[in-house]
Image (cartoon, grey):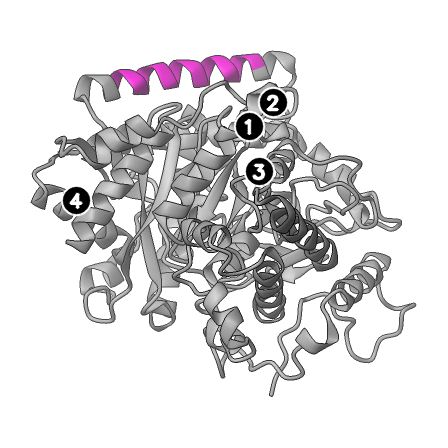
Amino acid sequence: MATTTNGTDQPQGTSDTDTPHWRQLALKHRQHQLSLIPPEWQLKDIPSEAEARNAIPIVEQHLSKEELEITALSQSLLSLQRAIRAKQYTAVQITKAFCHRAALLQQTSLCLTEIFFDSALTTAKRQDEHYASTGQLLGPLHGIPISIKDNQDIKDVDSTLGWVGLISKPAKSDSPAVEVIRQAGGILYCKTNIPQSMMMSDSYNHVYGQSVNSLNRNLISGGSSGGEAALVRGGGSVGGIGTDIGGSVRIPATLQGLYGLSPSTGRVGNRESTRRDKYVVPPVAGPLARDIDTLDAFVDVYLGQQPWLSDPGVLPIPWRKDIVESYSTTGRKLKIGYMTDDGVVRCQPPCVRAVDNTISLLQSGGHEVVDWNPIAQKHHGRAYELWLKAVLADGGSRFQALCDLVPGGEPLIPGMLVGKPKDKLDTDGRMALYDEIYEFTRMYMGLWKDAGLDALIMPVTQYTGLRPKMWVEADMYVGYTSLCNLLNWTGLTVPAITVDRELDKPSEEWMAYQGRSFSDRYNHKGYAENFEEFVGMPVGVQIVTGRLEEERAVGIARVLERLRTH
């Protein structure tokens, strides 16, 4: 049996003196991480990706009947809340089950960074004692383990962000999002993998290695919240928090058949969202879940803690259930735009079919649809240019400084969206870019208002999947997701279809297509070469709504869910 490795193993035939210092540090930290998994949970033999593509069956054969029930993929946040209230399971039982499943997924998908199962079980025991003695729960997330992306600080836990130079530099305090989870009674037990710099739609770094897709270990988990998506998809978490600056929640969600919300700035706490000195287009935090009920309930619980009273980055707007219901339960007729080609990079056939099927569903429900392709092809290329200019505006100086933290340096992983000195903007340049983004947003809002749209349905990304390291070979385009970040609008990934061998096979027209650019040609070539690997994989669509319209997006997701199940 072959064992999955993490990409930081010392090459055979070398000694420590031959191995770069950064690699030695990474390997040592990786060994420490493994030591935090109880010996009885450590797998002796792990099937290779060729022997077992899907991580979930590997994991489930090592779980007890009770653990399988608690961590079943059908479990939602709501069902776990009911089980806690009914005393069907204790907090310790639930926490131990999710810790075990997460540990197994880590060994098959490399989805975790920091592991702190012991402290999670201590918290769970304390919660059980409180519930037994008082009959009161310690918040709406009492007894429920919540996972979180590596870049969210947890006191006394590393936040390496995939950089070797940040190993053994634990956070001094909790991030705002972590504070709210604790306040609501949630139990934190692990952090999840990301790419070095978080500027890549893959999750690979020198510290923790290459996260892979829990449904197909020959494919990437996406990024930069790819570890979170792999953990949630594999059942190691009922739901967790990622972050998104250009698709980092939504792309991993579509690649693993999840719901993933990228809200406007100010809805979910994220310290980096307030750093206008650091970001022209700031990142946002948002949840990932296997079902819309969990995603809806999580944001409701989060905002129910009134985080704006302690986090200056959160707007005082509670979760407006009435807006969700006004779309999802009233039978109201919607006006929905749709697009499948932004004129820059052509989408692979399943990504187009996912949108087409979704639009057909809406039409079957009596909703009006509007072709947005002409607008997209006229303006979305410009939106991507502005977004790219914004994320490269520091000229790569932050990332170079992180490389230099290690004596002798740590290499920058190729393929990331990292600026070069020529991209650096001074104060005047940044102000000019702010003005350009403002004017573009005003123009786009005008087009939207004139069309009277409730939402836009569009692809999440142009590809169905990627093999590990494919990202570093190409200038991969993220224009289908970065639009929301540039506009500061809401984007919600929802599952739509799975790749079908007959319906989605490359056509003669697809094979003859020449491509518009290097990214377009690479995307075209990758689909033709790897099609068989994609068969059966999930493909989602993106629901785009305006600024601070997260409730509308969730309401429309519920409309789609109802149409699909009836």
Residue at position x 49%, y 60% in the image: 88
Q: Which residue is mark 1?
A: 282
Comes first in the chain, label 2 or label 4: 2
Question: Does residue 276 sit above or below 345 in this rendering?
Answer: above
**Is residue 459 toward the left or the right of residue 144 in the image?**
left
Which span is picked out in magenta?
A: 431-447
Amino acid of disc 1: Pro
Q: Which residue is mark 4?
A: 359
Whether residue 483 appears in magenta in the rendering, the answer is no
Instruction: Between residue 128 and residue 504, name the one nearer to us.
Output: 128
Q: Which residue is mark 2?
A: 274
Mark 3 secondary-structure assignment: loop
Instruction: Between residue 301 and residue 139, name the one nearer to us.
Output: 139
Comes first in the chain, label 1 or label 4: 1
The residues tagged by marks 1 and 3 sit, at their Cα atoms, a distance apart of 26 Å
| Contact (Cβ within 8 Å) of mark 2 with mark 4 | no
- Residue 122 in sight from this viewpoint: yes
Residue at position x 60%, y 59% in the image: 95
The residues tagged by marks 2 and 4 sit, at their Cα atoms, a distance apart of 36 Å
The residues tagged by marks 2 and 1 sit, at their Cα atoms, a distance apart of 7 Å
Identify the mark at residue 139; answer none if there is no mark.
Answer: none
Q: Which residue is mark 3?
A: 184
| Contact (Cβ within 8 Å) of mark 2 with mark 1 | yes
Mark 2 secondary-structure assignment: helix
Instruction: Between residue 311 and residue 470, name the one nearer to us.
Output: 311
Amino acid of disc 2: Thr
Mark 4 secondary-structure assignment: helix
Comes first in the chain, label 4 or label 3: 3
Amino acid of disc 4: Ile
Residue at position x 38%, y 69% in the image: 530
Amino acid of disc 3: Ala
